[in-house]
Image (cartoon, rainbow, N blue to C red):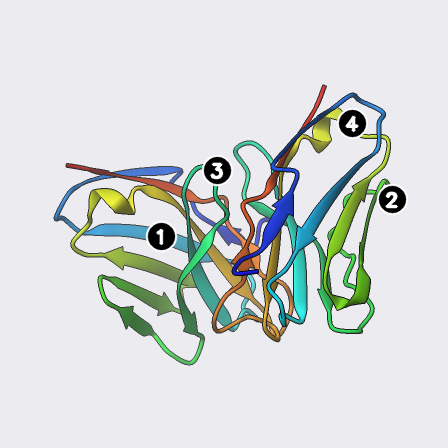
Amino acid sequence: GAGVSQSPSNKVTEKGKDVELRCDPISGHTALYWYRQSLGQGLEFLIYFQGNSAPDKSGLPSDRFSAERTGGSVSTLTIQRTQQEDSAVYLCASSLGTGIEGGYTFGSGTRLTVV
Amino acid sequence: DQQVKQNSPSLSVQEGRISILNCDYTNSMFDYFLWYKKYPAEGPTFLISISSIKDKNEDGRFTVFLNKSAKHLSLHIVPSQPGDSAVYFCAASEGNTPLVFGKGTRLSVIA
């Protein structure tokens, strides 16, 4: 597609349930990133995929969070046993190579609300 | 241990005047800096970047200045337009590591 697509755009879930958030990056982009933005905070790095390399998971806040990227394209971020502090906007981005000079292209995000 | 800091949560400027958004960083190994703009309900969009080997980069109405000794960068928008009203994020990278973002500054350009 023309841009990075994320689904769903909004998700309300009950505390303790699992959720899956999906990201379709720009075709041909080798790198894919997940960030989240909690209320009043900046963008917090979660995980980074680059080609066939092992992902950089250093930003995942707990073992309830995991992500995979299938076939070097679509990515799914899974949050198990959701907690209220998980409420945030989850943003996916992709880039060619490291994306440093041209920046990352972000999707519109998934707003997750845990009630 | 916030590595990228935007100390002004908001800024209000009159249309036609200059907007100056500031950003400080603590990691002297950062070698690339970027500014992003974000409208409500949209993802951030890339605006302008600068390498640590430069001290200025200009693109139309947008100029980014880098002062490495002070670990400070700024984004100048001139002239400011109402459509520039958005949240601006400063971001930095060390090598090929993922970008580290600040908390953002909300710019309001008043007509």
> Do the residues at discs 1 and 4 belong to one chain?
no
Instruction: Check disc 4 and report the residue beneath it.
Output: A83
Q: CA distance from mark 1 to mark 2?
A: 36 Å
> Do the residues at discs 1 and 3 belong to one chain?
yes
Instruction: Check disc 2 and report the residue beneath it.
Output: A63
- Position of residue A53 relative to residue B39, above or below, is below
Q: Residues within 10 Å of mark 3 (few under 14, many from 20)?
A: few
User: The disc labelled 2 sits on which kind of residue?
Assistant: Asp
Residue located at (32% from left, 58% from top): B75
Furthest-bottom residue in this view = B53
Q: Residues within 10 Å of mark 1 (few under 14, many from 20)?
A: many
> In the shown orientation, is residue A103 left or right of residue A47?
left
Q: Secondary structure beneath disc 2?
A: loop
Instruction: Check disc 3 and report the residue beneath it.
Output: B41
Earlier-in-chain disc, 1 versus 3: 1
Q: Which is closer to the viewer, label 3 or label 2?
A: 3
Q: Residues within 10 Å of mark 4 (few under 14, many from 20)?
A: some
Furthest-left residue in this view = B16
User: The disc labelled 1 sits on which kind of residue?
Assistant: Asn
Residue located at (37% from left, 78% from top): B54
- Is residue A45 visible in the rendered image? The answer is no
Earlier-in-chain disc, 2 versus 4: 2
Q: Secondary structure beneath disc 1?
A: strand
**Circles 1 and 2 in contact, beta carbons < 8 Å:** no
Q: CA distance from mark 1 to mark 4?
A: 34 Å
